[in-house]
Image (spheres, helix red, strand yellow):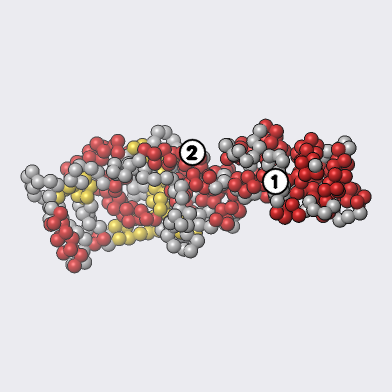
């Protein structure tokens, strides 16, 4: 029986193993679960699957929680520790044994190897000789699930009907010889006790869904709605690895992506809403549903990630970007990070964020504002200060010193008028001025730069070069 749960307030969960960082595939799974719960007014829960104590890392738990928090994915209630629920898992196994759905298996390792080889040769699943009863006295034992001898079928919200033949499922171990519960048993018990109605996860768990559905049915519990999403592949179509960018979300944070930009990009990795690519927070929460999930693996595309993040940079509040930028610049001794420099950055942010895809690129964009004086003008910029350029800059300095209107538009007219008086093309004025004021760093239009820096700073930068 595969009874599907449908209710108005779903409960979803994200259940990572605490053995490393929150990688981008896990982040996408968490996002889909959080959005689905939010869309339908339900709950999104966090469970740490920490039964493997040999690989358990408290630092990894912190990294997962910090990664989710940075992404803006808030879970409901306290995180559940799977390890702490071991007694409950054993209790359920005892129920299965009492019902005849599970049994004690006393096979030795050597016996198991022989029986498995025999089953393989005969083209059938492994069946324990202890499944029909017997007493091994004081011998060590595991507890196994009595696998059905009929096909197993689930209805998946993404994959459709999925069917396995009986020969594909062995008598599954539920409790190991040391009494520790196994993954599939613990997941079923925890999902049931947490009230999980929808299990949205990677399709590498699809076969596990077949096993888990059998345990649900044996216990008479409602089977959650399964939605198995294809894994993320690299740009070359192969399984995502570190060389492709299978990094923790903190790495993307350090590369300068905004959390909302990464959320939007992850949303589009395997889910679609027509041709729409850019989503506000409100649209993500209002539009996400299982119907938009695709069956084909999504490919990581850094160009598209940057494109989407650039859009969110443009939408972001200027002062928030300044604060994020200042956090990145903390400890930089090669840049000015005083309050005056911060004020310049605030004044320029509206224009600068239009030219940057990430916070890292924004650092490059503000470099011209934050370079300490006197600037070392080298390379191509230094060439603009040769010949009669310094004399012309000295004359321009005098004009600027007498300029009353220091607005961007007025400064633009002043510079253009100066070029006409000098009877030279604007490049003969603009290039030396840019070299002197920015040191040759990328910068917007010079009238904008002068307006942001203010009269005193501009004249001082000119003096550094002229004298």
In the displayed structure, would residue 149 be above or below residue 312?
Answer: below
- Kindly report the distance in space between the C-alpha atoms of the residues bearing marks 2 and 1: 42 Å
- From the viewer's perspective, tell me whether residue 73 is left or right of residue 435: left
For image coordinates 29% across by 37% down, the residue present is: 85
Against 168, residue 397 (above or below) is: above
Identified at 42% across, 33% down, the residue is 77
Front residue of 189 and 351: 351
Residue 256 visible in rendering: yes
- Earlier residue among tags 2 and 1: 2
Crowding around mark 2 (Cα neighbors within 10 Å: few <14, some 14 to 19, many 20+) is few
From the image, tell me which residue sits under label 2.
69
| Circle nearer the viewer, 2 or 1 | 1
121 left or right of 307? left
Nearer to me, 230 or 132 = 230
- Residue 13's image quarter? top left
Q: Quadrant of residue 116?
A: bottom left
Q: How many marks?
A: 2
Q: Residue at x 21, y 45 (%)?
A: 175
The residue that label 1 is drawn on is: 376
């Amino acid at each position: 029986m595969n009874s599907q749960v449908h209710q108005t307030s779903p409960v979803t969960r994200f259940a990572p193993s605490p053995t490393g960082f929150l990688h981008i595939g896990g982040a996408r799974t968490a996002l889909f679960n959080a959005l689905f719960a939010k869309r339908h007014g339900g709950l999104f829960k966090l469970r740490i699957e920490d039964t493997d104590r040999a690989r358990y890392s408290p630092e990894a738990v912190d990294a997962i929680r910090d990664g989710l928090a940075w992404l803006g994915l808030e879970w409901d209630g306290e995180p559940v520790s799977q390890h702490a629920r071991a007694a409950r898992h054993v209790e359920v196994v005892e129920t299965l044994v009492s019902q005849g759905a599970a049994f004690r298996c006393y096979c030795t390792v050597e016996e198991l190897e022989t029986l498995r080889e025999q089953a393989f040769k005969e083209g059938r699943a492994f069946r324990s000789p202890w499944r029909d009863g017997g007493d091994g006295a004081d011998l060590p034992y595991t507890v196994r699930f009595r696998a059905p001898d009929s096909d197993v079928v689930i209805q998946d919200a993404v994959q459709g009907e999925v069917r396995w033949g009986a020969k594909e499922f062995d008598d599954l171990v539920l409790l190991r010889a040391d009494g520790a519960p196994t993954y599939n048993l613990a997941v079923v018990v925890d999902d049931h006790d947490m009230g999980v109605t929808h299990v949205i996860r990677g399709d590498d768990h699809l076969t596990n869904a077949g096993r888990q559905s059998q345990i649900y049915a044996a216990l008479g519990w409602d089977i959650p709605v399964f939605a198995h999403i294809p894994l993320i592949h690299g740009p070359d179509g192969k399984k995502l690895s570190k060389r492709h960018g299978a990094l923790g979300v903190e790495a993307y944070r350090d590369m300068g992506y905004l959390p909302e930009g990464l959320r939007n990009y992850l949303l589009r990795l395997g889910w679609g809403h027509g041709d729409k690519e850019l989503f506000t927070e409100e649209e993500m929460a209002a539009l996400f549903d299982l119907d938009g999930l695709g069956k084909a693996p999504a490919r990581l595309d850094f160009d598209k990630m940057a494109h989407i993040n650039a859009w969110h940079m443009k939408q972001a509040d200027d002062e928030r970007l300044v604060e994020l930028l200042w956090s990145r610049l903390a400890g930089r001794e090669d840049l000015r990070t005083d309050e005056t420099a911060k004020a310049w950055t605030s004044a320029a942010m509206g224009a600068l964020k239009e030219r940057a895809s990430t916070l890292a690129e924004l650092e490059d964009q503000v470099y011209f504002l934050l370079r300490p004086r006197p600037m070392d003008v080298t390379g191509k910029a230094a060439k603009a200060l040769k010949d009669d350029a310094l004399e012309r800059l000295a004359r321009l300095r005098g004009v600027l010193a007498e300029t009353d209107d220091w607005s961007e538009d007025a400064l633009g007219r002043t510079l253009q008028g100066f070029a006409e008086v000098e009877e030279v093309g604007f490049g003969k004025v603009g290039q030396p001025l840019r070299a002197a004021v920015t040191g040759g760093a990328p910068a917007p239009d010079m009238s904008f730069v002068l307006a942001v820096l203010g009269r005193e700073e501009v004249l001082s930068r000119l003096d550094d070069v002229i004298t």
